[in-house]
Each structure stands twice: as structure tokens, then as C-alpha cells.
Image: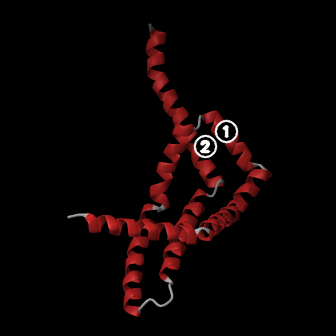
Amino acid sequence: MRRLLLLSVCLPALLLADEAAKRTKIDQLMGLMNSEALSRQMLDQARQNIMGQLNRPNTPPEMQAIEQEYSEKVLAIIAKSLDWSILKPKMAAIYDETFSESEIDGILTFYQSAAGRAFVLKMPELMNRSMKMSQDLIEANAPQIRKLTDEMVQKLKAQAAQQP
């Protein structure tokens, strides 16, 4: 009976200690992966995308001012939602739910290796080049997409004209 009582008292403490150890490993993993820097990079990429959309030729200055104000407000919202203090606990919870502690140990081993460090260092370049390649592929299809969009608009206008 004493053993059962002792086990019932000690088991929750042991489970909490295991969870704390796993969370510490997750924090270490996110540090090795430069997760905070990657979150800043995501924000910078969003900023570049939004600002790139605003730099259209022949846009009247008064419209540019309105678009600039809008984009600054949107960027403030995005920056707040991508702040590391908000992202980190959410990401840690995802890692905790997705990976077992032994899997995290293996991932940590990789990221602590020379190959893992190289992967982390080269990941931003890989991401940028991959995104550029994707954008180029999409832009190459822009005329087809515009044509389909124009066709859809015409069909919608024709449909609207038929409505009583």
C-alpha cells in the first residue's frame, strides 16, 4: 500500500519533469534552427511583397498615399502576429504535439552536426531561391491567368445582365 501511495505521489512529479525536459529540448531545437530569425525573415518577406505591389507605374500620388497608409497598417498587424513572443510558445506546442522526446533528441543531434549547421545557415538562401522560382513560374502563367480572369468577369457580367 505504501508503494502505491508513493507511486501516486511521485508519478505526477516525474511526468512533469519529463515534460519540462522535453520543453527544454524543444527550446534548444528552435534556437539551433534559428526559428526567431526565420520568423523575422517571414515578416520581411511579407513587407517586400506588400511594398512590391504598391510600386506600380502610373499610380496617382493621392492613391499611392492611401495605399501606403493601408500597407503600413497591414504590416503592423502582421508584425504583431508574427512577433516571436507570440510565435515561440505556439511553435513549441506544435513541436511538442508532433514529435516524441526521442525524435527531438534525433533532430537535435542532426542540427548540432556539421550538416545540420550548414542546413540552418543555407536555409534562408534556399527559401529565397525557392520562393523566387515559384513566383517566376506563377508570373510566367500570368497572361493565361489574366485571360481566364477576363473570361470569368465577362461571364459574370453577362449573368448579371440576365438577372431581373
Where's residue 5, x and y in %? 43, 14
Q: Amino acid at mark 1?
A: Asp
Tell me the residue at 68%/44% (across/down): 108
Decide: is 27 above or below 121.
above
Task: Tell me how far mark 2 sits from mark 1, CA to CA.
Answer: 8 Å
Residue in the picture at 47% in, 81% down: 54
For the residue pair 109 and 124, the one nearer the viewer reads as 124
Please provide percent x and percent y for residue 41: 58, 66
Quadrant of res 143: bottom right
Foreground pick, 16 / 150: 150
Left or right, 83 with respect to 141, comes to: left
Label 1: which residue? 105
Q: From the viewer's side, name the closer residue of 160 and 26.
A: 160
Q: Residues within 10 Å of mark 2 (few under 14, many from 20)?
A: some
Say the numbered circle drawn on residue 126. none
Q: Which residue is mark 2?
A: 25
The residue most toward the right is: 114
| Residue located at (44% from left, 89% from top) | 59
Residue 123, compared with residue 139, is above or below; it is above
Q: Assign a secondary structure to mark 1.
A: helix
Dot 2 or dot 1: first in sequence order is 2
Q: Are marks 2 and 1 in contact (CB under 8 Å)?
A: yes
Judged left or right of residue 71, residue 96 is: right
User: Considering only vertical position in the picture, is 67 above or below 74?
Assistant: below
Residue placed furthest toward the front: 162
